[in-house]
Amino acid sequence: MAIDREAIKYHIRGIIEALGDDPEREGLRETPDRVARMYAEVFEGMNYSNHDIAQMFGKTFEEPCSEHGHNLVVVKDIEVFSHCEHHMALMYDMRVTVAYLPNKRVIGLSKIARIADMAAKRLQLQERLGADIADIIQEITGSDDVAVCIEASHSCMTARGICRPSAKTYTETLRGKFETDASLQNRIR
């Protein structure tokens, strides 16, 4: 399903009116169009399933040989942002760590960041975002051993409601060996 910019413009205009402002005043006249273009960009991931994203960024390479077993691949501090599906509020200062044990194939490191970014460009729950990234990494690499850790601030907690600006949320999605191997868990934290 494609993002409908015309519908967004129409509804943003209605929101401006519902807030008691004039959508025709100079500062707001182009706001519905600007918001529609912004939403098309920040919610781009809604156009794609996890499988679609895996296909987009699925180029892999033969795993370099390791004399001591599997290599561990960890990419830390991937900065992304998202919007929570409950309030459409910004999830920011979001840092994603992705780790996996290769299964004969490795993915380009920049692709891991691109996957995290595209999966975040949806109305999301932080917990689902971790699961989505893990699903995509598993599909691409063929590895059952994947971990995704996310730390973020949620403006629905920091800027409204309870108003706790220092609150952070930390989630982990642990699959395969990461579920039970404490030494692997310690290497990603």
Image (tube, rainbow, N blue to C red):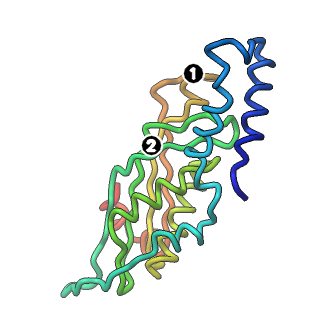
Name the foreground residue: 67 vs 15: 15
Name the foreground residue: 169 vs 26: 26
Which badge, 2 or 1, comes first in the chain's sequence?
Answer: 2
Which quadrant is home to the C terminus? Answer: bottom left
Residue in the picture at 44% in, 43% down: 94
Badge 2 amino acid? Met
Q: Secondary structure at mark 1?
A: loop
Labelled pair 2, 1 in contact (Cβ < 8 Å): no
Give the vertical position of 164 relative to 40 (above or below).
Answer: above
Left or right, 109 with reference to 59: left
Residue in the picture at 56% in, 62% down: 131
Residue in the picture at 50% in, 70% down: 56
Residue 91 shows which numbered tag? Answer: none
Give the vertical position of 104 relative to 75 (above or below).
Answer: below
> What is the C-alpha distance between the residues marked 2 and 1?
18 Å
Which quadrant is home to the N terminus? Answer: bottom right
Badge 1 amino acid? Cys
Question: Which residue is identified by label 1?
Answer: 163
Give neighbour class at mark 1: few <14, some 14-19, many 20+ (Cα, 10 Å).
Answer: few
What percent of the width, then of the height, locates residue 87? 68, 35
Tag nearer the camera, 2 or 1: 2
Q: Quadrant of residue 103?
A: bottom left
What percent of the width, then of the height, locates residue 110? 34, 62
Q: Secondary structure at mark 2?
A: strand
Residue in the picture at 31% in, 85% down: 62
Question: Which residue is identified by label 2?
Answer: 94
Name the foreground residue: 174 vs 42: 42
- Check the image and name the residue furthest to the left: 67
Q: Quadrant of residue 97?
A: bottom left
What percent of the width, then of the height, locates residue 132? 57, 62
How many marks do you count on the picture? 2
